[in-house]
């Protein structure tokens, strides 16, 4: 009886170890994906800023043309 209990416990410990390893790998993968998405976001924010500046410049030129 004790032998069966010990084998069951060993099996559960092995499952926990496997789960921890899977979760550790998944965590690394998610961190990498998050870093990549953060980079993409920063690039998009910069592109948006540049586009906004260009549009504001064009609007300023149009208003200047309208006044003259």
Image: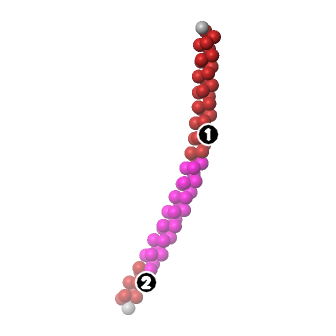
Q: In this view, does 13 lie above or below 34?
A: above
- Residue to which mark 2 is pinned: 61
- Asked if labels 2 and 1 touch by Cβ distance under 8 angstroms, the answer is no
Pointer 1 local density, CA inside 10 Å: few below 14, some 14–19, many at least 20: few
- Look at 54% across and 54% down and name the residue there: 38
Report x, y in % for residue 4: 61, 12
Depth order, front residue of 49/15 = 15
Q: Give the prevailing secondary structure in the magenta stretch.
A: helix
Pointer 2 local density, CA inside 10 Å: few below 14, some 14–19, many at least 20: few
Report x, y in % for residue 3: 63, 11
- Residue to which mark 1 is pinned: 25
Residue 17: quadrant of the picture = top right
Distance from disc 1 to disc 2, alpha carbons, whole Å, reads: 54 Å
Boundaries of the magenta span = 32-58
- Look at 36% across and 88% down and name the residue there: 67
Residue 61: quadrant of the picture = bottom left
């Amino acid at each position: 009886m004790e032998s069966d209990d010990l084998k069951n416990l060993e099996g559960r410990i092995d499952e926990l170890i496997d789960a921890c390893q899977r979760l550790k790998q998944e965590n690394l993968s998610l961190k990498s994906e998050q870093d990549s998405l953060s980079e993409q976001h920063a690039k998009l924010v910069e592109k948006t800023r540049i586009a906004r500046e260009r549009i504001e410049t064009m609007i300023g030129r149009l208003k200047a043309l309208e006044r003259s």
